[in-house]
Image (tube, grey):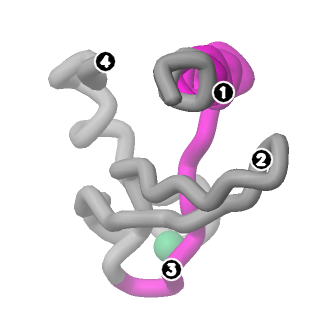
Amino acid sequence: MSLPEDVMEWGCAACGGTLEMVKVGFTYMKGNFEVDLPACSSCGMVLVSEELATGKMADAERILEDK
Ligand SMILES: [Zn+2]
């Protein structure tokens, strides 16, 4: 799972700030996961496309199934 390089060039849609990768924790299927997502370094808005979020969820399911 990797992000397209140009994702970091989008900038924040809300304030125009630069993006950085941050760890975001979420709970899914009774499991806790941390994923790296692009977030604004100025206002903290996390950019998650539907495609990206779905991919992360699929990864999470695989992690659970491995256990
Ligand atoms: Zn911002």
Earlier sequence position, callout 3 versus callout 2: 2
Q: Are marks 1 and 2 in contact (CB under 8 Å)?
A: yes
Earlier sequence position, callout 1 versus callout 2: 2
Q: Are marks 4 and 2 in contact (CB under 8 Å)?
A: no
Q: Residue at x 37, y 65 (%)?
A: 23
User: 27 or 17, which lies in front?
Assistant: 27
Q: Amino acid at mark 2?
A: Tyr
Distance of label 1 from label 3 (alpha carbons): 22 Å
Earlier sequence position, callout 4 versus callout 1: 4
In the rendered image of this protein, does residue 65 appear above or below residue 14? above
Distance of label 3 from label 2 (alpha carbons): 22 Å
Q: Which residue is mark 3?
A: 44
Q: Which mark is residue 1?
A: 4
* Region rendered in magenta: 42-61
- Tag 1's secondary structure? helix
Q: Which residue is mark 2?
A: 28
Q: Residue at x 16, y 23 (%)?
A: 5
Q: Amino acid at mark 1?
A: Met
Distance of label 4 from label 1 (alpha carbons): 11 Å
In the rendered image of this protein, does residue 48 appear above or below residue 54? below
